[in-house]
Amino acid sequence: MERIPVVILCGGKGLRLREYTDLLPKALVPVGKMPIILHVMKIYAQQGFNKFILCLGYKGDMVKNYFTKSEDVRDFEITFADTGLETNTGGRIKKIEKYIDNDNFFATYCDGVADIDLHTLYNHHKKANKIATLTAVHPISPFGMIEIEDGLVRSFKEKPTLPSLINGGFFVFNQKIFNYLAENSVLEDEPLKKLALDEQLAAFSHDGFWACMDTYKDVERLNGIWETGYMPLGYLHFKKAPWKIWE
C-alpha cells in the first residue's frame, strides 16, 4: 500500500483536562509510561502507516521536543506543523494542505484509541468512493442504567454500551476535503455537515473497543485499563489493553 500520511490533531488546549493541561499539552498526558499521542501513533505504525503530520498549537514546542528526544519514534517520519494557538480543527487540517501529496490520507485526534483495522477502514473508504469517511462507534453511557417492570427495579446495568453511534475520529479523507475547509472552520460542524448534505461522507462502523480521553476520569480509566486489563465500564476484562496491538 502507498505511504499514506496520518494527520493528527494535537493543537487544542484541552480545557476539560486542566488538571494536566495547565502544564502539558493534551497530547502528552500520560497513559502508562507513554503520552496518549504515542499510543495513537503506534496503532497506525503497527499497521504500516508511520508517516505523520502533527498539527501543533497549544504548547506545541513541548510535543516537538518530546519526539525529538524519544527513542520510541526512530522509525517514524514526523512533520511538525504549527497550525496556530486558536485555530479550530478544520482550520488545522486546512493549514497542512501543502504537506499532502497523496490522493487520500488518514486523520484523527490525539486522544482516541481503538483496536481498529486501518486497512479495512482504508479499503472501505476507497470502495465508497466518497470524499470523506469517518469511523462510527458506540459510546459507553456515563451513567448506570436500571430496568423497571411493574414499578419495581428488576436489574442494573453498569454504564452499558449505547446502541446509538457517534463520530469516533479515525478519518480517511480525499484531497477534495480541502475544498470544504476554511482557515478556521470546525471540522465537526459545517464541513462534515456539508459533506453529508452532498452525500460525500461515508461511515465505517467499528464495533470493537474505542475510548477517548476528554476528562480527568477518562485519564484514570485508560490508565487503569492499560495497567490491569480491567475495564470498569461494563466490567470487562482483557489480557492487555485492547488498543495495544503492537505487542
Image (cartoon, rainbow, N blue to C red):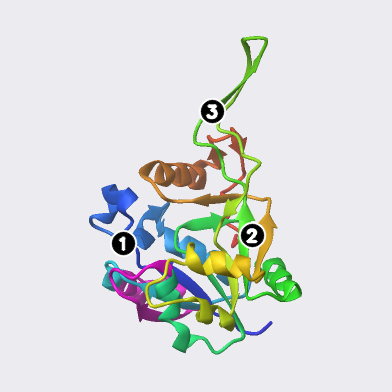
Q: Are marks 3 and 1 in contact (CB under 8 Å)?
A: no
Indicate whether residue 95 is drawn in magenta.
no
Would you name the residue on which mark 3 appears? Answer: 144
Q: Secondary structure at mark 3?
A: loop
| Identity of the residue drawn at 56% across and 41% down | 140
| Identity of the residue drawn at 36% across and 56% down | 29
**Which residue is more in the foreground, 173 or 227?**
173
Can you name the residue that lies furthest to the front here?
A: 197
Any part of residue 195 in sight: yes
Q: Secondary structure at mark 2?
A: loop
Rate crowding at label 2 as few (under 14), some (14 to 19) or many (20 or more) other CA atoms within 10 Å. Answer: many
CA gap between label 2 and label 3 equals 26 Å
* 163 in relation to 75, above or below: above
The quadrant in which residue 119 appears is bottom right
Which mark, residue 116?
Answer: 2
Mark with earlier residue (3, 1): 1
Residue flagged by tag 2: what amino acid is it? Ile
Residue flagged by tag 1: what amino acid is it? Pro
Q: Position of residue 100 (x, y in %)?
A: 51, 86
